[in-house]
Image: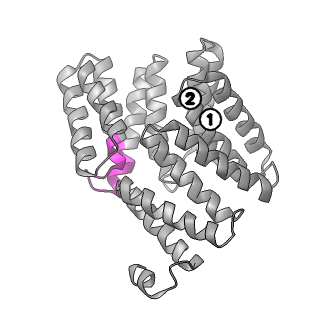
C-alpha cells in the first residue's frame, strides 16, 4: 500500500483508503502521532473531492475523535464526533448501529469531563436504539451497560448501578473468544466497575480473562496489554499489595514509553504510581 501512495494521484479516494488503513495499523501499534497524520490527510482528500457526507469520512472523524480522547483533548474529540454524527444522521435513519456508535462516542467524552447529565442522555439514547435493532451488537451493548452503571454509581443511584452491572455481567457470561478485539478492553472496564462496586472477586475474574485474551493474540508488550496491567495494578492497590501494584503500573508505563503513548495516557499511569 505504501507503493500505491507513490504511484497514484495524491488526491484520489484510493489514496485516502490507503491512508485510512495505514492510520488504523499505526493506531493498533500504538503510534498515535502517525495515525493522526494519516487520518487527517485522508480527511483532506475526501473534503477536496467534495465528498463531505461520505460515510467513510465519518469513520475518519470518529478515529480522530478517539485520538482526541487518548490525548486528553476533549474539545477536539467532541468536534470530530459531532462531525461524524452529522454525516451519519444525514445518510442513515435514526435506528442504525452507526448512530449508536456516535452516541456512545459523545457519551464517553461527557463521561471524561464529568458531565454526567449529558453522558447519561447519550448512553440511554444509544441503548434505546440498539435494543430496536434486529441483531444488537453484544460488545456495543456491553460498553453501554458499563458506562450507565458507572454513571449511576457516581450519581449515587446504587440500585440502578447494580442492575446495569448485572446486565453487563450477563453479556460477558455469554461472550465467545471470536468476539471483537474491543471485548478485551471492555473486560478491563468491567473489572474496574466491579472493583468500584465492591465486587473484588469478579474484578479479578474479569481482569484475568482480559489478560488471557490479549496474551493469546499479541506479544506481552503490545499496547493492548497496557490497560490490563493498569487494571491489575488497581486491584493490587485495593488489596494493599503495594509492591505488586507498583510492578504492574511500571510494566504499563514501560510499554507506553516504548510505543509513544500520549502525554495524557502516561500522566494517568504516573498518577497511579503516585497513589501507590
Instruction: Judge left or right: residue 260 versus residue 131.
Output: left
- Residue 247: where, in percent of width, then height? 19, 32
Which residue appears at 57% of the width and 59% of the height?
60
Give the secondary structure at mark 2: helix
Check the image and report above or below for 133 versus 54: above
The dot on residue 107 is: 1
Q: Can residue 55 be seen in this view?
A: yes
* Quadrant in which residue 120 is drawn: top right
Q: Work out how far the residue at label 2 is from the one at label 1, CA to CA, in angstroms.
A: 6 Å
- The residue positioned 42% from the left and 27% from the top of the image is 203
Disc 2, disc 1: CB below 8 Å?
Answer: yes
Residue for badge 2:
111
- Span of residues in magenta: 211-226
Task: Judge whether 268 appears above or below 251 on screen.
Answer: above
Q: Which mark is residue 7?
A: none
- Residue at the image point whose x is 45% and y is 88% from the top: 7
Is residue 78 found left or right of 70 in the rendered image?
right
Query: For residue 156: magenta?
Result: no
Dot 2 surroundings within 10 Å: few (below 14), some, or many (20 or more)? some
Mark 1 secondary-structure assignment: helix
Viewer-closest of 1 and 44: 44
Magenta stretch contains residue 215: yes
Amino acid at each position: 500500500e505504501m507503493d500505491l501512495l507513490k504511484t497514484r494521484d495524491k488526491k484520489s479516494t484510493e489514496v485516502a483508503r490507503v491512508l485510512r488503513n495505514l492510520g488504523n495499523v499505526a493506531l493498533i501499534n500504538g503510534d498515535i502521532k502517525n495515525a493522526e497524520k494519516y487520518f487527517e490527510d485522508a480527511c483532506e482528500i475526501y473534503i477536496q473531492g467534495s465528498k463531505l457526507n461520505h460515510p467513510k469520512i465519518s469513520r475518519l472523524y470518529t478515529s480522530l475523535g478517539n485520538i482526541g480522547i487518548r490525548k486528553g483533548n476533549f474539545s477536539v474529540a467532541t468536534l470530530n464526533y459531532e462531525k461524524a454524527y452529522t454525516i451519519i444522521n444525514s445518510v442513515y435513519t435514526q435506528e442504525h448501529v452507526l448512530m449508536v456508535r456516535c452516541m456512545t462516542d459523545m457519551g464517553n467524552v461527557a463521561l471524561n469531563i464529568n458531565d454526567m447529565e449529558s453522558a447519561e442522555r447519550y448512553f440511554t439514547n444509544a441503548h434505546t436504539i440498539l435494543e430496536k435493532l434486529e441483531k444488537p451488537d453484544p460488545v456495543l451493548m456491553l460498553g453501554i451497560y458499563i458506562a450507565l452503571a458507572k454513571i449511576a454509581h457516581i450519581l449515587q443511584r446504587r440500585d440502578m448501578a447494580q442492575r446495569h452491572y448485572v446486565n453487563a455481567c450477563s453479556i460477558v457470561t455469554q461472550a465467545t473468544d471470536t468476539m471483537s478485539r474491543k471485548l478485551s478492553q471492555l473486560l478491563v472496564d468491567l473489572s474496574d466497575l466491579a472493583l468500584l462496586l465492591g465486587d473484588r472477586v469478579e474484578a479479578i475474574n474479569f481482569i484475568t480473562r482480559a489478560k488471557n485474551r490479549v496474551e493469546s493474540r499479541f506479544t506481552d508488550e503490545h499496547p493492548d496489554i497496557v490497560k490490563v496491567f493498569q487494571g491489575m495494578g488497581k486491584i493490587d492497590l485495593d488489596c494493599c499489595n503495594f509492591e505488586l501494584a507498583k510492578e504492574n503500573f511500571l510494566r504499563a508505563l514501560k510499554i507506553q514509553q516504548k510505543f509513544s503513548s500520549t502525554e495524557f495516557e502516561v500522566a494517568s499511569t504516573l498518577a497511579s504510581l503516585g497513589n501507590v
